[in-house]
Image (spheres, rainbow, N blue to C red):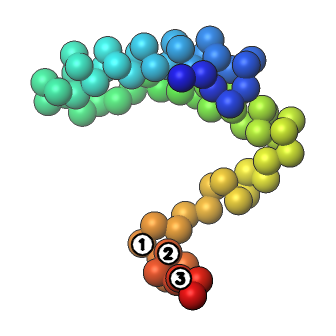
């Protein structure tokens, strides 16, 4: 799957590859240290944040935590 921004596709591909390697070779064998891909994630995250700004996506709305809050429990009836 591509990124939300074409400019981030290569960074996403690199992060996904690193994550898959970490997951299969480290995590599933009990090594929970996820720092292996942190530099890939950081670069991809920076690209995504810029792309969202460029597309006028409000980052404050994206970063709001709802799970486990009263807001999550509210329903529109």
Q: Is residue 2 above or below residue 71?
A: above
Dot 3 alpha-carbon crowd within 10 angstroms: few under 14, some 14 to 19, many 20 or more = few
- Report the disc number at residue 75: 3
What secondary structure is marked by label 1?
Answer: loop
Q: Which residue is mark 2?
A: 72
Q: Is residue 69 left or right of residue 61?
A: left
Of badges 3 and 1, the one in the foreground is: 3
State yes or no: discs 3 and 1 in contact (Cβ < 8 Å): no
Q: Which residue is mark 1?
A: 68
* Alpha carbons under labels 1 and 2: distance apart: 7 Å
* Tag 1 near tag 2, CB within 8 Å: yes
Q: Position of residue 62 (x, y in %)?
A: 66, 54
Which quadrant, please, contains the C terminus? bottom right
Q: Quadrant of residue 27?
A: top left
Q: State the SS at label 2.
A: helix
Q: Residue at x 22, y 16 (%)?
A: 25
- Give how far apart the Cα atoms at labels 3 and 1 are: 14 Å
For residue 15, side relative to residue 58 (left or right): left
Determine whether 3 is above or below 7 in the image: below
Residue 30: % across, % down: 14, 30
Classify residue 76 as left or right of residue 46: left
Q: Where does the N terminus fall, quadrant-wise?
A: top right
């Amino acid at each position: 799957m591509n990124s939300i921004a074409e400019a981030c596709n290569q960074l996403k591909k690199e992060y996904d590859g690193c994550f898959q390697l970490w997951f299969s070779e480290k995590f599933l064998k009990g090594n929970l240290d996820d720092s292996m891909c942190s530099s890939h994630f950081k670069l991809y995250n920076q690209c995504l944040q810029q792309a969202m700004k460029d597309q006028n996506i409000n980052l404050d709305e994206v970063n709001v935590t709802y799970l486990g809050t009263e807001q999550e429990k509210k329903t529109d009836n």
